[in-house]
């Protein structure tokens, strides 16, 4: 369960609560959503909880452990979940230099005692592929530490540069069911949503009953990458998605703050 609301006496004054009046659909699983929920509530917004995916153990933990042990010049961790799950299967150190697709993942690696950590100037696959250390990979073994269906742009970019990929699928995502009436109620109270993966966005679209779909497509989305933004536009969302430079909870919430200030 999520923690209690911040007591009213400890809330910031109204002028420092820029999300007042905004309902934000929070789709990350518990407990990962806790910080996002706290930031939204502290800024005066309503956090509307709709976890779309659960994070489960790998389908084949033995194969994932073997993949983690194989020699590689570079291990790229695609998410905080990947770091946490990998550490359960095989505690660090892992062979080769470790890289992260963003600041949150890099922080998770450092919490595991990994140092140094290679991280991009802007979060996501495109930012990571811009790093000079990833330009010449022909004949080098690169490990992707991920869930099922690793980031397609990243895997494609690494292969184009000649990398020999080892894929360590250390966790899996499971889609969570929600009754149609629950979707109707939450969407009726929401003006925005934070969705942190393409799979979650697809699941949200599939869950939403037809009569609530116009409200869903009118939401202001905050998303982690241009690829998922393109997915949203193809699905028919009418507002241009917000894609912050950094993909972490404060950046996603701040993107909504900037947008909401222009609309109230």
Image (spheres, grey):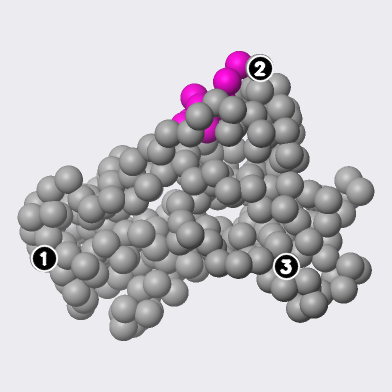
Image location of residue 29, percent across then percent down: 45, 52
Image location of residue 204, percent across then percent down: 52, 32
**Residue 69, quarter of the rendered image:** bottom left
- What is the distance, in whole Å, between disc 3 and disc 1 at their CAs? 43 Å
**Residue 185, quarter of the rendered image:** top right
Classed neighbour count for the residue bearing mark 1: other residues with Cα under 10 Å, few (<14), some (14–19), many (≥20): few
Mark 3 and mark 1 lie on one chain; the one further toward the N terminus is 3
Label at residue 69: 1
Q: Disc 2 designates what residue? A: 211
Circles 3 and 2: CB atoms closer than 8 Å: no
Badge 3 element: helix
Q: Residue at x 34, y 51 (%)?
A: 55
Badge 1 element: helix
Give 254 or 117, whichever is nearer the viewer.
254
Q: Disc 3 designates what residue? A: 42
Q: Which residues are magenta?
A: 202-210
User: Is residue 138 in view?
Assistant: no
């Amino acid at each position: 369960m999520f923690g209690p609301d911040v007591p009213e006496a400890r809330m910031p004054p109204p002028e420092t609560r820029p999300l007042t009046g905004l309902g934000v659909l929070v789709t990350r699983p518990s407990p990962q959503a806790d910080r996002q929920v706290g930031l939204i509530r502290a800024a005066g917004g309503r956090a509307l909880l709709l976890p779309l995916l659960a994070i489960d153990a790998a389908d084949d933990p033995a194969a994932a452990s073997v993949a983690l042990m194989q020699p590689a010049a570079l291990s790229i961790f695609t998410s905080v979940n990947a770091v946490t799950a990998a550490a359960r299967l095989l505690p660090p150190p892992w062979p080769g230099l470790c890289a992260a697709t963003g600041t949150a993942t890099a922080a998770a690696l450092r919490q595991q005692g990994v140092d140094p950590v290679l991280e991009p100037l802007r979060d996501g696959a495109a930012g990571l592929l811009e790093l000079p250390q990833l330009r010449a990979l022909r004949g080098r073994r690169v490990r992707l530490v991920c869930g099922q269906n690793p980031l397609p742009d990243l895997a494609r970019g690494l292969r184009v540069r000649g990398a020999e990929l080892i894929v360590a699928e250390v966790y899996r995502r499971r889609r969570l069911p929600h009754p149609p009436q629950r979707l109707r109620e939450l969407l009726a109270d929401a003006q925005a949503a934070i969705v942190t993966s393409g799979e979650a966005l697809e699941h949200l679209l599939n869950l939403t009953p037809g009569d609530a779909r116009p409200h869903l497509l009118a939401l202001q989305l905050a998303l982690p990458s241009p690829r998922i933004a393109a997915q949203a536009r193809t699905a028919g969302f009418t507002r241009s998605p917000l894609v912050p430079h950094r993909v972490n909870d404060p950046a996603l919430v701040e993107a909504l703050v900037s947008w909401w200030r222009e609309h109230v």
